[in-house]
Image (cartoon, helix red, strand yellow):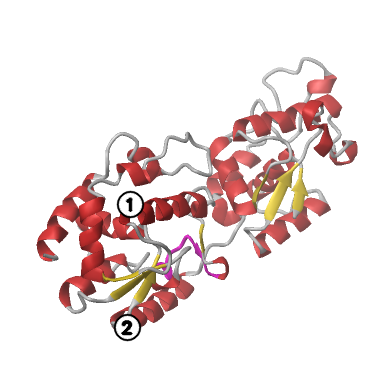
Amino acid sequence: MLELRPYQLLCLVCAQGADGAAPEDAGLAQVRDAIRKDPDQPVRLVCNAGDVYAYQDPGPAGDTPEGAEFNRKRDLDILCRLDLAPGNVLPARALLLTLLHAIPTVAGICGYESTTSEAWRGCPRAGSGCYEKGREKGIDALIPPRSPEEMAREKRASMEALRSGKGITIRPHILLCAVCQYGGGVRPPYADDNLPELLEIVLTTHPDLPVTMARGADWAMCAPCPKRVPGLNACVNVLGSGGLSNEKRDLDTLQRLGLRYGSTLKARDLFRLIFERIPTTQPICGRRNAAPSVWWDGCGEENRSEGNRNYEKGRRELMEKLR
């Protein structure tokens, strides 16, 4: 597990804004390289918070030269913006994505509008614009994305398996996503997942295709997704923590359908069951968590008060075709 001070996360982004130069601190350059190599490794945030959080105080060894009070305030300001506590642990990708979402500028964090005394002069790079430029480059500047070649290769291989008609595995809630896509007019070919192709096959050649409920960002449907981490069979689409929100959606879907992981149904029967028991996405997809949160995503926010209208449209159209 990596252990970092909150301000060091800002330094990683700031370095990217300085033409991607290595952080001035050699140890932080090693952290950057470690995160690029393993983007989803756990990172523990520690700072000199004192009080009931004194158990995790790292001491002054990691302080920058601006002074103890400035260092304490900067770290706590960052944690407050992230809505995290000292000692919290998150995957590195999730932490960095949350940071980029929550902190658009270091103004008021690393430097102040006025200098009240020498103790509050702040970081000399605070007004350079490097952090803001680094943030504009996004997460891909810190963590390389999946290559187009890899995703295209995975698309071809997974489509061969799907067209064989031998049966597929799928995480439960994306069956609802397939209906949403259909209602929104998405049709094959579709680059980011295999859901439109699944529906086309069910509607035309294999209505009795065996479909088995599986955990995680399963290969059969999610192989080409830009937000899939193949080595972990994980989804990183929700501030890097898609597994949390999506796992809950999976379990909510299974509960509504009376199924469990490993359950297998013929595709036509499965969609009929979905249309009978899940008339709207709102109770499954809705989220009331405010961003930044590892539970938040745009779909969840859109489903707060009513279900996805594309789902309702797709449900009506598919019910007619799957009678």
> The residue under label 2 is which amino acid type?
Lys
Q: Which residue is mark 1?
A: 256
Q: Residues within 10 Å of mark 1 (few under 14, many from 20)?
A: few
| Residue 259 occupies quadrant | bottom left
> What is the residue that sits farthest to the top in this orientation?
116
Q: Which mark is residue 132?
A: none
Report if residue 260 is visible in the image: yes
Q: Residue furthest front?
A: 258
Q: Horizontal placement of 29 versus 129: left or right? A: right
Identity of the residue drawn at 39% across and 77% down? 158
Residue at horizontal 61 percent and vertical 31 percent from the top: 81
The one of 7 and 271 positioned closer to us in this rendering: 271
Q: Is 224 a magenta residue? A: yes
In reply to whether residue 71 is colored magenta, the answer given is no
Residue 120, percent from left and from top = 79, 22
- The location of residue 34, given as percent across then percent down, is 72, 60
Q: Amino acid at mark 1?
A: Arg
